[in-house]
Image (cartoon, grey):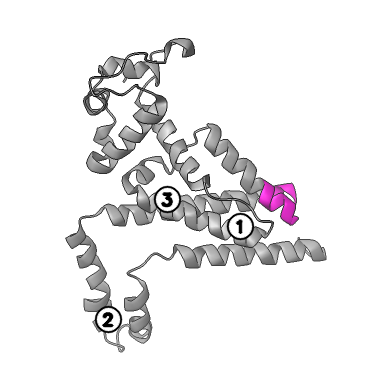
Amino acid sequence: MPDRVVQPAARQRRRPTKQGVVLSEELIVATALRLIEEHGADALSVRRLGRALGADPSSLYRYFRHTDDLMLAIADELIGRTLKAWRPTGDWVADLRELGLRMHAGALAQPRAAMLSAHRVTGRAHEIQAVESILGVLRRAGFPDPEAVRIYHAFVDQSLAFGALDSAGTALPKPAREAEAEVWRSTYGRLPADTHPHIAATAPHLVATMRSSSYPAALELLLAAARTRLDHIRAGTVD
């Protein structure tokens, strides 16, 4: 999908496609998300999208200059879905906890799209809203601006990284997921204490916990560290 610029006023398609729908950015993004989950990154071609929409592939240039432009729109749509039902309450720890868990759940709901988009910076409306909202939560909590940005950066990167990591596991075929989970019991759970004392001592816990995501625990560790940092700031003991 090469660069191609169409003036905004000319973007709206006035006639329905062969399937009786009127093209829009929202429809194209929703269709692309569905195709990505079915076919992976290969879904982002104008030919495949055109077929799915019942439209001439060239009509997509009215809305997106190229496939990377569409990818940024998809990334921003995922952010928008996360923000849709999230409202800060004034309890900054609870607010960030809820948002982080929503981000992680949103990635698992669209695992292939999450893997493709987690590293992108869109500069679009939903991302801007997210940056503004999270920084607002942190600044209102009392973090100085440099600290607010530092914690914002760690919080978002942690959420996106775990979302992509766990999405990659979710995207594996079920037999492969089950085989990997079984390794903790069949291999690590049977290592002898005389050669691997630490693994042997913790084996029941490894078997019980390593099958699931560690994101909730990692999120709590980050929030606890941020809370301690804020306490030091308020006490004037920060280096």
Query: Which residue is depicted at the point 43% across and 31% down?
Result: 73
For label 1, the residue is: 95
Name the side, left or right, on which 83 lies relative to 209.
right
Q: Are marks 1 and 3 in contact (CB under 8 Å)?
A: no
Q: Could you say where residue 8 lies in the image, as x and y percent from the top left?
A: 48, 14
**Image quadrant for the C terminus?**
bottom right
Residue 212 image point, x, y percent = 36, 67
Question: Which is nearer the N-term, disc 1 or disc 2?
Answer: 1
Q: For the residues marked 2 and 3, what is the alpha-carbon distance in whole angstroms?
A: 32 Å
Q: Toward the viewer: 188 or 113?
A: 113
Q: Nearer the viewer, residue 2 or 131?
A: 131
Separation of disc 1 and disc 2 at Cα? 38 Å
Q: Where does the N terminus fall, quadrant-wise? A: top left
Q: Which residue is mark 3?
A: 106
Q: Amino acid at mark 2?
A: Gly
Dot 1 or dot 3: first in sequence order is: 1
Front one among 129 and 112: 129
Provide the secondary structure element on which disc 3 rests.
helix
The relative height of residue 219 versus residue 150 in the rendered view (above or below) is: below
Q: Secondary structure at mark 1?
A: helix
Q: Residue at x 31, y 88 (%)?
A: 193
Q: Position of residue 103 (x, y in %)?
A: 47, 51
> What residue does disc 2 label?
189
Residue 164 appears in the rendering: no
Looking at the image, do the residues carrying marks 2 and 3 touch, with CB atoms under 8 Å apart?
Answer: no
Q: Residue furthest right?
A: 236
**Left or right of residue 135: residue 173:** left
Count of numbered labels shown in the rendering: 3
Circle 3 Cα neighbour tier, 10 Å, few/some/many (<14 / 14–19 / ≥20): some
What's the magenta region?
Answer: 136-147
Distance CA(mark 1)–CA(mark 3): 16 Å
